[in-house]
Amino acid sequence: MARIQSKRNSTKKEVIIEKASRLFREKGFGAASMRDLAEHVGVEAASLYNHIQSKAEILQTICFKVANEFMTNLEAVEASQQPTLKKMEAIIRLHIRMMLDQYEFVYIADHEWRHLPEPYLSNFLNQRRNYRKRLGDLLEDGITKGEVKPIDTYTAVLVILSAISGIDSWQRSRKSTTAEALETNMVKYLIEGLKK
Amino acid sequence: MARIQSKRNSTKKEVIIEKASRLFREKGFGAASMRDLAEHVGVEAASLYNHIQSKAEILQTICFKVANEFMTNLEAVEASQQPTLKKMEAIIRLHIRMMLDQYEFVYIADHEWRHLPEPYLSNFLNQRRNYRKRLGDLLEDGITKGEVKPIDTYTAVLVILSAISGIDSWQRSRKSTTAEALETNMVKYLIEGLKK
DNA sequence: ATTTCCTGCTAACAGTCGTTAGCATTCTCT
DNA sequence: AGAGAATGCTAACGACTGTTAGCAGGAAAT
């Protein structure tokens, strides 16, 4: 019987999750069915349950994988010794790159988290809130040190993160602008607003 | 039989659409059921069909209502005689205000449009592309006239619109920042990046 | 007062949902 | 070669989906 696991560097579960991420983004978590997913994986729906526990587990895996990756990066940047603006730039660039080459995963963590079942939902939202808070603190610190223009940090964090998540609409319609140009221009616009 | 239409200034259809907008935002279009909606309206599911044609029709109504409102405003601004930066500010402020007091509708047009059936989907996406194109042209014009800093207009439009749609996450958690402060700060950040 | 329209109801349709049970096949390891 | 684990299959479950048919009661118009 046609087994899964075509690529050698990934378990069957990872294959399922990867295919699911594509599907969840295209149709939304609620509208994507397990039979849909199974077909993309090349297997019957029931067979998926040899590798995963539930549809919700897939969503959890994706959301927390992304959240952890961002959090790990944030901690590294916080611990680093560099000017605040450089720190912010590093974070912004990571967000943009994640949006560019882990698009499906990031998109789902950004837009489909509301379908997480409790207690994962609360957990996820707490992490999210904490992340934004620490980004705000980082900016606040930069203002205190005189490295950043005195602005409302809550608004700044909101603008920065939202702007990046809008790359979504660029992904959908690969037009003239290249990924590199987009990153450069976006960093320029967002950092410019923070300079004194 | 308990009729709908409690408020005098709205038809039953409008009541349904208003309740639906709330539901669609909370659960997503796919996950929100007609029986769900009926319960919020205070009626049986089948009765809804005396006022609407289908679930999809509700989504269409909402999406195009929002799209038309933005497009009408853009045309008014384009026709007005004022500096480019003032035009942009007017547009940004309208977007923010719409996000503040027509939150449910705007959110759905922003996030649930992918569930539109054809040909409405293509139609909607065309309008959206056209809208952004014209915003970009407006900025381009400002650059030519020397009123706006020479930037990549595609990126600028992306950043501006995305940043505003991020107000969504502010709506969800009414915290310290007031709506007025948010508008002021956001306009400041976004316009600052356009000034020479 | 009677007709007509509007809007509500219940019941049901055909289909899809996520998931489980039970069994067959194949892979891995001794 | 044979045992056991891993992974596939088919069939089915109960619940839920959007929607329609047919009917009843109240509102508006004559």
Image: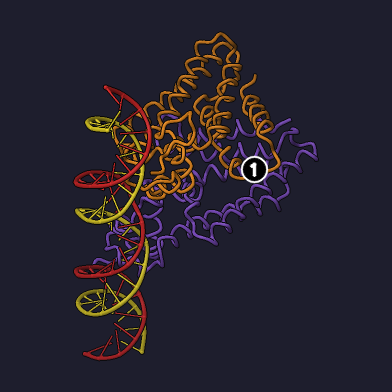
Chain colours: A purple, B orange, C yellow, D red
Q: Residue at x 53, y 32 (%)?
A: B102
Q: Residue at x 77, y 38 (%)?
A: A143
Q: Is residue A80 left or right of residue A43?
A: right
Q: Position of residue B57 (x, y in %)?
A: 34, 36
Q: Which quarter of the figure has residue B50?
A: top left
Nearest the viewer among A25 and D17 is: D17
Question: Which residue in the structure is indicated by mark 1?
Answer: B174
Label 1: chain letter: B
Quadrant of the image containing the N terminus of chain A: bottom left
* Vertical comparison of D5 with B27: above or below: below
Residue farthest along the right direction in this orientation: A145
Quadrant of the image containing the C terminus of chain A: top right
Q: Is residue D8 left or right of residue B71?
A: left
Q: Amino acid at mark 1?
A: Arg
Nearest the viewer among A120 and A21 is: A120
Q: Is residue A48 left or right of residue C15?
A: right
Q: Position of residue A13 (x, y in %)?
A: 39, 64
Q: Which quarter of the figure has residue B4?
A: top left
